[in-house]
Image: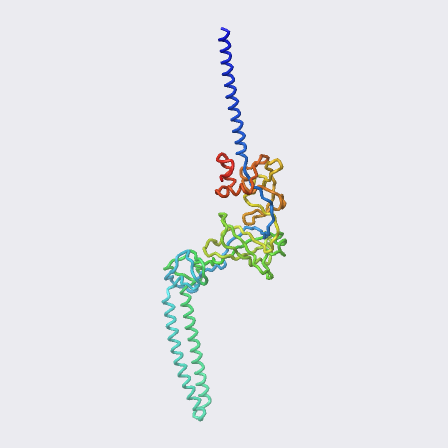
């Protein structure tokens, strides 16, 4: 009986020992997995030194697009509009025939003027012959001086009538030319206000408008304070500049316009109403992307480079308090550094406050970094391994469970 109790106790003790051992193994496994996950969840980052670059200072301002020429087509003669040789919205070339006012009445006037000129020319020839004979007869004393003077006067009157007839013909041809309306300049033509068959007159106003759109103007303004700050800088056009001042244009949808413009004018007064001064740039528009009247963002570049601290845009984050970057403290934890920027330079931000050259900041893998939490700083060799397989550190940090070290 005693042996049975001993056996039972031994079996129970063994079972308890096995249960405790299993529990310990489970907890140890959870601990190790947690430790591994903590390692794997630690963002992998790359550090870079803060550097300076030769940066051209810029200013930004809202701008408005304006045609270099706006030409209103106003008929110069009365008549019925007979033809239209373009479609609304076409790009027309200088000298292109656009509209024809019914020409018959002008042709009739031209023919009459030609007939009058022929008659006057014939009379002038006869007057020349009469004058020649009168001159010979006067020399032989066959006619009186009064008769000679009368013949001379008739000759002069006949030549004057020729001149008048020529002028009448030129005027008739001028009016006929006005019946054929051509494009005074190349550009995009708008919708016509009348259609063939309507009677048009100069008093009726313009019947269509042409806007020259290549090149095209960009107008923008600076307040008087900013203007005076820049008066002696190379961001305002002057006759002494060797290089033109360039601008970049950002379209309303945020797209950067592919062509750069040149600043060529600023006004001679500051507006009393707005306290601003107008400036103008000229820019190519071969594709017709820029449309007169539209609003854009203008960035004006100075020609005098300045050394400035720049950091990659991908290293800079933003929250309601402003922009910031991360560096790594002595314990391997990420730490926020607040910065202030003044525009972009290529793919970098120009930093005016918060950083100094030589400081190290996180430039890759920043998306998963949390202030005060540990990060794993990779070596250049480790980063190169990820680059070889086409992975960024942000992509690696998004899926830490896939691997804890680069694939070799």
Q: Position of residue 162 (x, y in %)?
A: 42, 78
Vertical placement of residue 374 versus 98, above or below: above
Q: Is residue 273 visible?
A: no
Who is closer to the viewer here, 42 or 23? 23
Q: Position of residue 7 (x, y in %)?
A: 49, 11
Who is closer to the viewer here, 119 or 150? 119
Residue 85 relative to residue 145: left or right: left
Who is closer to the viewer here, 32 or 176? 32
Q: Position of residue 265 (x, y in %)?
A: 56, 58
Quarter of the view holding residue 205: bottom left
Badge count: 0
Vertical placement of residue 298 versus 366, above or below: below
Q: Position of residue 391 (x, y in %)?
A: 49, 41
Q: In this figure, which colouring scheme has been used for the structure?
A: rainbow
What residue is shown at x 42% (from left), y 87% (from top)? 132
Q: Is residue 5 visible?
A: yes
Residue reaching furthest to the front: 3
């Amino acid at each position: 009986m005693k042996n049975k109790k001993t056996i039972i106790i031994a079996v129970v003790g063994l079972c308890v020992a096995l249960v405790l051992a299993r529990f310990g193994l489970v907890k140890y496994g959870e601990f190790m997995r947690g430790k591994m996950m903590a390692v794997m969840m630690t963002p992998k980052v790359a550090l870079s030194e803060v550097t300076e670059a030769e940066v051209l200072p810029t200013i930004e301002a809202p701008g408005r697009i304006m045609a270099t020429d706006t030409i209103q087509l106003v008929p110069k003669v009365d008549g019925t509009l007979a033809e239209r040789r373009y479609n609304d919205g076409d790009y027309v070339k200088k000298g292109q025939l656009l509209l024809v006012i019914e020409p018959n009445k002008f042709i009739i006037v031209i023919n009459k003027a030609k007939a009058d000129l022929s008659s006057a020319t014939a009379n002038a020839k006869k007057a020349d012959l009469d004058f020649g004979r009168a001159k010979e007869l006067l020399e032989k004393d066959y006619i009186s001086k009064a008769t000679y003077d009368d013949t001379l006067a008739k000759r002069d009157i006949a030549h004057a009538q020729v001149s008048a007839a020529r002028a009448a013909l030129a005027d008739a041809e001028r009016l006929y030319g006005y019946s054929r309306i051509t494009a005074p300049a190349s550009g995009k033509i708008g919708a016509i206000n009348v259609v063939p068959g309507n009677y048009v007159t100069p008093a009726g106003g313009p019947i269509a408008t042409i806007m020259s759109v290549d090149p095209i103007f960009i107008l923008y303004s600076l307040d008087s304070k900013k203007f005076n700050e820049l008066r002696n800088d190379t961001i305002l056009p002057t006759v002494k500049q060797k290089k033109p001042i360039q601008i970049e244009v950002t379209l309303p949808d945020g797209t950067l316009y592919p062509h750069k413009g040149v600043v060529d004018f600023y006004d001679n007064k500051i507006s009393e109403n707005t306290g601003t001064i107008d400036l103008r740039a000229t820019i190519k528009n071969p594709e017709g992307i820029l449309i007169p009247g539209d609003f854009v963002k203008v960035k004006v570049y100075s020609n005098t480079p300045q050394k400035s601290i720049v950091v990659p845009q991908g290293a800079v984050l933003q929250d309601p308090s402003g922009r910031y970057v991360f560096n790594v403290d002595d314990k391997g934890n990420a730490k926020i550094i607040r910065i202030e920027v003044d525009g972009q330079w290529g793919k970098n931000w120009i930093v005016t406050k918060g950083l100094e050259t030589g400081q190290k900041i996180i430039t890759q893998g920043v998306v998963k970094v949390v202030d005060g939490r540990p990060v794993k700083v990779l070596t250049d060799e480790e980063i190169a391994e990820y680059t070889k397989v086409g992975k960024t550190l942000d992509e690696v940090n998004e899926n830490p469970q896939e691997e804890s070290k680069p694939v070799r």
